[in-house]
Amino acid sequence: MSQNSEELLQWLEGRRSVRRFEDRPLPPGLLERILRSACAAPSAHNRQPWRFAVVSAGETRRKLTDCMAAEFRRDLQAEGLPEGEVETRVARGVDRMLHAPGAVVLCSSMAEMDHYADPRRDQAERVMALQSASLAGGYLLLAAHAEGLGACWMCGPLFAPQVVRDALDLPADWEPQALIVLGWPAERPEARKRRPFEDTVSWR
């Protein structure tokens, strides 16, 4: 393995999910550059079924946050969690969403994917769209890392897709999958324990 390859692997392993950010804005053009890099991801049939909704700070961000928080609160209460724990978990999510300099809702779209009468094949096509959108999201995280930013993938939109659509007035075919918050990191999280490599690979 060359030194450059080793350095790349160390860089990849050095990426962290960052949830606390410095209170300073992203330079003009930086987020667009990151999103353009995300669009370089591979995709099924090269249909590129990812969509990105950039959520500006201010009224739009507050509306999205309030709507998602209300849905999250209802879900936690339905699970029977103590009210104190409910509010703690809701407040944690609200803080991350409101105070991140950048926020992007990652969506998938079936508009340009193939459609089949066979439900099995049609479902497989939907999974391919989701896989492709997820790859673009992964590229986004790595592009942010390359720019010196921290970022965190939040799955909240999966649990409240219509709420997100309504809050952002998204096109009908945009299916919210994740919210990615990013900015200049105000923390350096420790590496989390990883599953042993031998448990994840089967050599056949």
Image (cartoon, grey):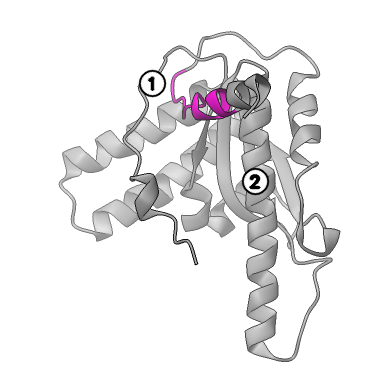
**163, above or below 141, in the image:** below
Magenta segment includes 101: no
Residue 171 location, x and y as percent?
Answer: 76, 56
Which residue is located at x 42 percent, y 51 percent?
71
Q: Which residue is mark 2?
A: 106
- SS label for mark 1: loop
Residue 192 image-quadrant placement: top left
Left or right, 199 with respect to 155, comes to left
Q: Amino acid at mark 2?
A: Leu
Q: Which residue is mark 1?
A: 189
- Comparing 114 with 82, the one in front is 114
* Magenta residues, start to end: 9-20
For this view, does 93 lie left or right of residue 80? right
> Residue shown at 33%/56% (left/top)?
75
Relative side of 124 to 173, left or right? left
State the image coordinates of residue 49 (x, y, percent, origin top left): 77, 57
- In the image, what residue occupies the spot 61% across and 53% down? 176
Quarter of the image where one finds residue 147: top right
Residue 56 in sight from this viewpoint: no
Q: Please tell me whether residue 76 is drawn above or below residue 113 in the rendered image.
A: above
Q: Nearer the viewer, mark 1 or mark 2?
A: 1
Label 2's element? strand
First in residue order: circle 1 vs circle 2: 2
The front one of 42 and 18 is 42
Q: Is residue 86 above or below residue 100?
A: below
Name the image quarter holding the N terminus.
top right
Instruction: Find residue 30 and report its horizontal and vertical position in percent.
Output: 75, 19
Q: Residues within 10 Å of mark 1 (few under 14, many from 20)?
A: few
Residue at the outermost left position: 82
Asked whether 199 or 52 is in front, the reply is 199
